[in-house]
Amino acid sequence: MGFYDPTQDGEMPVRAYLITEQQFSDIAAQEMHRAPGADLDFTRVLTSGRDQLGPGRYETLVCPGALDGVPLLTFTAPWRLTDAELNAPSAPYLANFARGLAEAHGWPLGRSAEYLATRPGAAGYWTAQAVLEALRSSVEESARAAGAASA
């Protein structure tokens, strides 16, 4: 799982989708393991930048800013990065992030590998070279699977 700690310095690449309040409410409910259908109240998160709806993972709403006047919203855990017990990500998990970085930002595998190897949880476990090898392996595996599916 990945979490966003808005108290940490620095920048991170993101991807944004323009969705309705109802769509966001349904996605958040699913991640919070709640029944979809109830609309969230965005008043607190839009005025203070944060609203903790519960103690669990993905039950804290965060508004880190706006893009073209539209508020950016996400959900994360209520704890800070310094309080989290981190686990090293798997190669498929890193490959998923690399695909997103390529699609949203045009990052080549090498740049993604360098970035991902420095992220909390991966840093100290994965080197940039090891991430790059895992990403290349994942790309080759995906290509083989696509070839088999079209045959």
Image (spheres, helix red, strand yellow):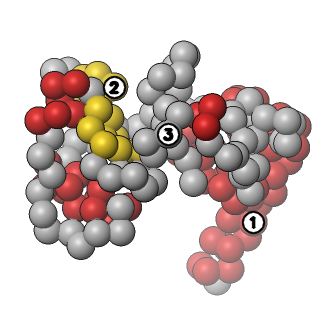
**Residue 49: horizontal and vertical position, in percent?**
27, 27
Query: The disc labelled 3 sits on which kind of residue?
Result: Trp
**Residue 106: horizontal and vertical position, in percent?**
55, 33
At label 1, counting other C-alpha atoms closer than 10 Å, the crowd grade (few under 14, some 14-19, many 20 or more) is few
Q: Of the two numbered discs 1 and 3 on the same chain, state the one appearing first in sequence.
A: 3
What residue is disc 3 on? Answer: 79
Residue at the far bottom: name it.
151
Could one spot residue 144 in this view of the protein?
Answer: yes
Where 106 falls versus 95 (above or below)? above
Residue displayed at 48% across by 22% down: 7
Where 10 falls versus 36 (above or below)? above
Q: Tell me the element at label 3.
A: loop
Q: In the image, is 87 to the left or to the right of 100?
A: right
Q: Which circle marks residue 141 in the picture?
A: 1
Q: Nearer the viewer, residue 113 or 55?
A: 55
Q: Tell me the element at label 2.
A: strand
Residue displayed at 20% across by 21% down: 68
Q: Are marks 2 and 1 in contact (CB under 8 Å)?
A: no
Where 127 falls versus 144 (above or below)? above
Q: Which circle marks residue 64 in the picture?
A: 2
